[in-house]
Structure formats: C-alpha cells, structure tokens
Image (cartoon, rainbow, N blue to C red):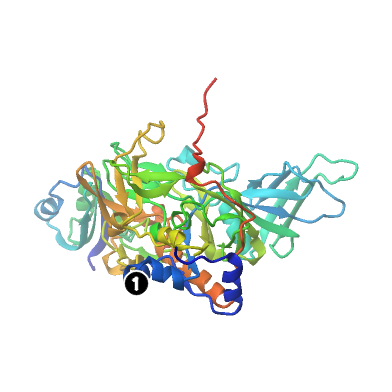
C-alpha cells in the first residue's frame, strides 16, 4: 500500500507553506523520472487548467433599487437581453445571448460580434454598461421603464454561475462535405481541410481525475482569474471511458461541471467575450482545478500524458448534426498537438480552439496560490458521479 | 509613377490560370511578385507590383477572370493583449504568417509573410487580428 493523505493533512501543509505542488504538465515528467510511488510520496497537489469557449456560462446580477422602484420584467445590457423571470432587479445574462436586432445567420456566416459573453467581459473589465429595463408596473414597483449605465462596482451582486463548464473531452471536428461549415468547433474547411479540437489534453481538469475521486460539491477552483467553486455536476454530465478496439481505456469523456464564483474578483483576461463566425457568441472561460494526491491511484490518472489521452474524430457536416453514432477514429492529444492527424488516409492539419499556453498559465497561477498558502483545498461535501454510475444521455423524441 | 501594389485573391476555380503570362504578354505590364500563396484547396493570394501604360486594362482583365483585386494599403496586425494563443487561426492562414511554435504551443505572427487575405479577422474568436490602414 502506498501513501495515503487527507485533505486536512494537505491543507495543514499548505498553511505551513510546505505543500509540494506540481502542474499537471510537470507531474508527467516527474512520474516518468522516478515512478509513481516515489512521486506520490512527495507531491501533495497537482494543478490543472483550461482556457476555452464554454457556452453554458452566465452571471446573476442584482442591480439595486431605483426610486421609484421598478420590478424589471425585461432587461437589456448593452442591447443584449438578460433573463428576468426571477425576483425584482435580479437578472441572468447568458454568454450566448445576442441582441434582438443582431442579424445572426441571416447574413450567413454571421459575425456575432457582441453577445452576453462580451457583456460579462465588459462588466469584469469595469467598463460602464448600458442598462435598459421595462416593467408592467405594480403597486409596490410602480416604475415601468429605466435607462441608465452601471459598472460592476455599482451593483449589489455579480455571480458567475456556469451550469456546464470544463467539458472533460471534446470531439475533434472535421468536415467531409464539399463546402465550408461554421460550427461551435470553429470554421471547418471542406474535404477534411482542417481538424479542430478543444481541450488542453494533459492539463485538462476532468481528464486528470476521470473517476471523480476528488472533484465534487465544494471543490475550490480557479475561475475566471478569481476563486470559484464546483457546485454540482454540469448539465449533460455523462462521464465514461474512451476505449480502443481491444477495449483498453485510452481516455475519458462526458463529464461536466457546474461552477460558481464572485464575478467581482475575476479578471477580464480570464473571461473573454468570444464570437464564432456562423455559429454564435460565447464566453471563453479560464478554469483550473487542484487535484489532491490522496493516494497513488489518483496520481496515476493525474499523470496521464497527451500520448495516453484521446479524442474521437467526428464529421460535423453530416454525422454530428444528424446524431449519427460512431466516429472516424480516435486520435491522441499528442497527435493533435503535433499539427497533423491522419483521417481516412488523408493528412489533415489540426488547430486548437482552447489555448494550451493559457491553460498552462492557469495551472501555474493556481500552483503559486497554493504554494503561498493563499488557497486551501475545498474538501467536497459530496463527490460527483463518475463513470461507475453509468450515466447516459437521454434523447429528445418528437411526439 | 511608382508601380501599383495590389493584392489578388483567387478561388479554386481561378487559381489555375496563367495570369502573369497574360499580364506581361497581352498588356505589356512589368510584374513583380512580392508574395504568393496558394493553399491545398487551391485558394490563393498574391501581392504584386504592377506597372505599365495599360495598367487599367490589365486590372480589368484580372477582374474579368473572377479574381478580386484590391490595392495593398492595409496591414494586418495582432493585438497582443487580446490574442489568447488559442491557435484557431493557424489552419486558416494561407501564408504561414500565423503559426504554432512547438512544443510551447504559443501562436506566433510573422507580419512579413502576411498576404493580407483577412481570413484571420473572420476566424479569430476574440477578434485579436486587426487591420491597420
Ligand atoms: S491576413 Fe491573416 S490569415 Fe491572411 S495571410 Fe495575413 S495573417 Fe495570414
Ligand atoms: S485565433 Fe485569434 S486569439 Fe487565437 S491564436 Fe489566432 S489571433 Fe490569437
């Protein structure tokens, strides 16, 4: 039996400034050099990171009350609608929302220059944002309209709450058709012109704890440059394994996280308004999770490398839109990062959509926070379902 | 008068024509190819210095071939603060001006190679590529 550690022991070492922390990239070399047992005995925490577009993101805002009061049944921020079907002067600005007069894909492929994600970036950057609201007027909330500007400091709360972030793995997207297509995986040129992928591979949080042995409700994380928490599993959380033809495990996929944090302490360089030509607006989110090395088994997964982690290659011209099962093969992240992969016998250039250099920076920032004693690990009050739970997606039947 | 600096953009159906030959032979123009790039999909961009009395006729000939012709008055620059080094632009840059440095995976921009095709302005998700006129 190898080393065993508790959260309490690790946090005591963090407070004492003695914790040994490596990034998910650094730990790979360490394990190769000196083996699992010795590394597990030395390392307390492995930090991960990812910086990519995460559409299921948004922020709850509370604007405070005007005189006379307004309930706010409709809200626009810089012209982008926010959801108001909740209490007075609360609203949720979703990352993918666009202005009602945005031409969207009527001007195919649309540009989607400004959406909810951009509003969030502007708020975090402290820029003034135009607030417009309408209401039907009640005895207690008589005002029917308001127009003003707000900054993040003027409003009561700004809470980033992202119901589906940190996707464990993504398809590597290609286009088998004869025309360019515009997808959430970027612009895909015809006839296998390019292959786009979107995780940080060996730095990617959920690929490094695929059993959800440490990540759960209450896990403290790096979120948008500030501190956030895992609050639940994400929507569409169906964690499982990727297997090769012989049934060997060659990666994981399907897990997601719901995360939350105080937007007021986040930073615009880690929350970027993002536009996908022909697809829509979104938010690029910086997210990093510390993995406590409670035992050797947890380290074994945390030390998986790009050579051992894979993604399925999927056609986004036919297969994906029509929900046809199957894929065009599995490729390793090492292959994806090399700049080319082979699909159907053809060499295809690859491009990432999530930034590996920024993911590395996040893992380093998190490492520094922990080393300085500023950031203690949150022990989950409940772990999230892992692959053993056998969760699978339901399909929507048309009745 | 100094030669005109122009950018030609080809689609796959126009990239296989011997246009330089025709510009020289039929229109008596002096042609200097500053940069030329064609991608595997046969879409191409060419930057030319073009000079001669029948310049306007030559330009008309190019347009008649379905080739888009623009004066080279623009320069594409990268806004460093906005660029996240994601790499999404690198497979769309026909000139290799935007490329990933390995193993760091940092995205580099070499303005000298840029043929001002403006592809990166459309595909960059955070609008880090900008035109300077
Ligand atoms: S405009 Fe952009 S895509 Fe085109 S050559 Fe220059 S850098 Fe490359
Ligand atoms: S797509 Fe934009 S952000 Fe990404 S590397 Fe290219 S210029 Fe930078």
Return the residue found at the far front.
A1
Name the residue carrying label 1.
A34
Most foreground residue, A354 or A251:
A251
| Residue drawn at (38%, 31%) of the image | A324
- Residue A36 % position (x, y): 38, 66
Tell me if residue B55 comes above or below residue A31 in the rendering: above
Return the residue found at the far bottom.
A17
Mark 1, other Cα within 10 Å: few <14 / some 14–19 / many ≥20? few
- Residue A162 % position (x, y): 59, 51
Return the residue found at the far left.
B25
**Side of B37 relative to B81 (left or right):** left
Return the residue found at the far top.
A399
| Residue drawn at (79%, 56%) of the image | A64
Of the 4 image quadrants, the one containing the C terminus of chain B is bottom left
Look at the numbered disc 1 and give the secondary structure of its residue: helix
| Residue drawn at (46%, 52%) of the image | A210
């Amino acid at each position: 039996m190898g080393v065993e550690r508790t959260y309490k022991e690790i946090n005591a070492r963090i407070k004492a400034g003695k914790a040994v922390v490596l990034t998910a990239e650094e730990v790979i070399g360490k394990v190769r050099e000196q083996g699992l047992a010795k590394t597990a005995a030395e390392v307390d925490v492995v930090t991960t990171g990812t910086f990519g577009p995460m559409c299921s993101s948004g922020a709850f805002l509370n604007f405070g009350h005007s005189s006379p009061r307004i309930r706010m049944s409709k809200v626009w921020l810089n012209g982008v609608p926010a959801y108001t079907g909740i209490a007075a002067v609360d609203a949720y600005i979703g990352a993918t929302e666009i202005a009602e007069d945005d031409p969207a894909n009527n001007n195919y492929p649309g540009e989607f220059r400004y959406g909810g994600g951009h509003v969030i970036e502007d708020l975090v950057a402290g820029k003034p944002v135009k607030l417009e609201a309408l209401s039907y007027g009640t005895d207690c909330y008589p005002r029917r309209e308001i127009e003003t500007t707000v900054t993040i400091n003027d409003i009561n709360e700004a809470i980033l709450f992202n119901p589906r972030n940190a996707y464990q793995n993504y398809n590597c997207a290609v286009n088998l058709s004869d025309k360019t297509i515009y997808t959430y995986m970027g612009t895909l040129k015809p006839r296998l012109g390019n292959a786009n992928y979107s995780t940080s591979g060996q730095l990617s949080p959920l690929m490094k704890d695929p059993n959800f042995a440490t990540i759960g409700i209450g896990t403290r994380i790096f979120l948008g440059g500030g501190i956030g928490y895992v609050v639940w599993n994400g929507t569409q959380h169906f964690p499982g394994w990727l297997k090769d033809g012989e049934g060997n495990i060659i990666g994981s996929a399907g897990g997601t996280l719901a995360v939350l944090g105080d937007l007021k302490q986040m930073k615009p360089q880690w929350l970027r308004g993002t536009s996908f030509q022909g697809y829509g607006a979104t938010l690029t989110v910086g997210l990093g999770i510390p993995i406590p090395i409670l035992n050797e088994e947890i380290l074994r997964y945390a030390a998986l490398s790009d050579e051992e982690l894979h993604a399925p290659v999927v056609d986004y011209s036919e297969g994906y839109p029509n929900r046809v099962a199957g894929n065009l093969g599995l490729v390793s992240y090492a292959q994806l990062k090399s700049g080319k992969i082979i699909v159907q016998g053809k060499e295809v250039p690859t491009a990432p959509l999530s930034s590996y250099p920024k993911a590395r920076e996040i893992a380093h920032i998190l490492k520094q926070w922990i080393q300085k004693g500023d950031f203690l690990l949150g022990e989950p009050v409940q772990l999230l379902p892992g692959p053993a739970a056998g969760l699978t997606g339901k399909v929507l039947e048309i009745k | 008068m100094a030669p005109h600096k122009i950018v030609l953009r080809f689609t796959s159906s126009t990239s296989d024509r011997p246009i330089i030959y025709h510009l020289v032979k039929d229109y008596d123009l002096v042609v200097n190819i500053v940069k030329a790039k064609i991608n595997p999909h046969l879409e191409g961009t060419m930057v030319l210095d073009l000079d001669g009395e029948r310049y306007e006729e030559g330009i008309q000939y190019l347009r008649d071939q379905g080739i888009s012709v623009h004066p080279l008055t623009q320069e594409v620059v990268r806004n460093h603060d906005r660029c996240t080094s994601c790499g999404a632009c690198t497979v769309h840059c026909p000139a290799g001006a935007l490329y990933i440095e390995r193993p760091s995976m940092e995205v580099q921009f070499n303005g000298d190679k840029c043929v001002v095709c403006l592809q990166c302005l459309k595909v960059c998700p955070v609008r880090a590529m900008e035109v300077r006129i």
